[in-house]
Image (cartoon, rainbow, N blue to C red):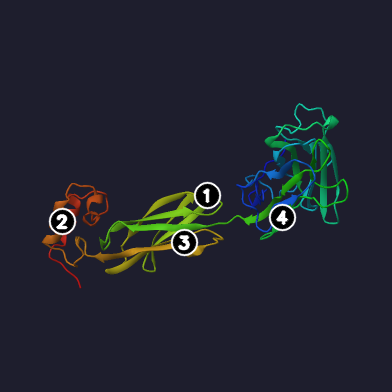
Amino acid sequence: MRNRFSKPFYFSLLTITILSLLTTRQAFSGFPPRSYDGPGIGAATFYITPQDSNFTSTKPTDNRTGEWFSIQVRIANHSNVSSWQIQLIWKTGLLDIPYPLYNVTKGSPYIFTGIPSTGLSLSLDPFNGTHRRLLASESTYLAAEAPAAADSGLLIIWFQIKSDPDPAQTLSTLLYFEEKAPVGHKTWTLDGSLEENDCTMLDGYYENKYFLLVHDVAMTNVMSSKTVVGQGESMNISVTVENQGDYTEDVNVTAYANASIAQRGNITLTKGSSATITLTWNTSGFVKGNYNISAYAEVLDDTDPADNSRADGTVLVSLDGDVNGDKDVDGKDIALIAKYFGKPASYYPNADINNDGEIDGKDLSIAAKNFGKSWI
């Protein structure tokens, strides 16, 4: 079975680009459609499809050499065609059509379907020292003309990749129709009188680009559960991290109060995922005062460490029971605890003095012990 593209060490971007398709497709930059004026009475447009076939990789291999992809050569807006011929050329070292030529078959719906014909003629040979050429043709018996059609198939071609790019390198080649060539070697159609018709040729493009897979995480949010915490008590710091790289990562996350470590944690993130980890800061051993809260996410070989850290804001370490942050414990603090008494801590986190998730008698008792005390 032919191999579809994949690999973990780099992405290979494989693009077959139609440079222009009739009047509705935009020509590839620098390579406009080319026309040939013949004495016949018909006209046609040769083109390559798909326009943009992009493949990314998933299998464990370092290269794509030997892998396959296909294109179609088609003919649009044709009439008065009794014979056709194409000469398709590309760089030798990048792509090949290995012998035997069973990798080249008729397209669908084929232009001469139901019309007696000579059969498909194929040959493959060097075009020059750097390029290779496929010559394909077929004619109807007695110069019978195919019915006019908006679009018909000519060929399906399977190419084999012959080389891979190095890091930061792009390998590319035109897949182009040759109209200026020795007698018998160019791209054309003939009408029933065996005169060459007008034709337009829309070339294709192959590109194999090396994309290095990267390690990259970003800190997207840091949120402190409280703005005031009693000295010796705890509070939560929620940290959200996003994996913006290409690998599953075990991320080391550290929360800081000023330059001191509040707590460390670890989170596993698959490619493209985001998650929040909750770290707990126990303020035992921290002097009273304001602390800037921040967090940092770390993985090895991160390609963009600038977004690995994020600051939240300031938290005051104060007396146990100072709920409103005015550096004393008084009736205002008791009133706030009483207001939210029996509620979950989310209603007013500062009043959950012991950080057990509830505003209850335990918190009121802590504040009562320090009632009337203050500090500067």
In the foreground, 291 or 243: 243
Q: What's the mark number on residue 172? A: 4
Kindly identify which residue carries mark 1: 271
Q: Amino acid at mark 1?
A: Lys
Tell me the distance, in whole angstroms, between the alpha carbons under discs 2 and 1.
45 Å
Q: Residue furthest bottom?
A: 376
In the foreground, 358 or 65: 65
Q: What's the mark number on residue 336? A: 2
Tag 1 near tag 4, CB within 8 Å? no
| Mark 2 vs mark 4: in front | 4
Q: Residue furthest left?
A: 331
Dot 4, crowdedness within 10 Å: few (<14), some or many (≥20)? some
Q: Position of residue 187 (x, y in %)?
A: 79, 46
Q: Residue at x 77, y 43 (%)?
A: 197
Question: Which sits earlier in the primary sequence, circle 2 or circle 4?
Answer: 4
Can residue 69 be seen?
Answer: no
Kindly identify which residue carries mark 3: 308
Q: Position of residue 231 (x, y in %)?
A: 26, 63
Tell me the distance, in whole angstroms, between the alpha carbons under discs 2 and 3.
37 Å
Q: Residue at x 66, y 43 (%)?
A: 50
Question: Which sits earlier in the primary sequence, circle 1 or circle 3?
Answer: 1
- Determine whether the residue tagged by mark 4 lies in a helix, strand or loop: strand
Q: Position of residue 193 (x, y in %)?
A: 83, 37
Question: Which sits earlier in the primary sequence, circle 2 or circle 1?
Answer: 1
In the foreground, 102 or 277: 102
| Mark 1 vs mark 4: in front | 4
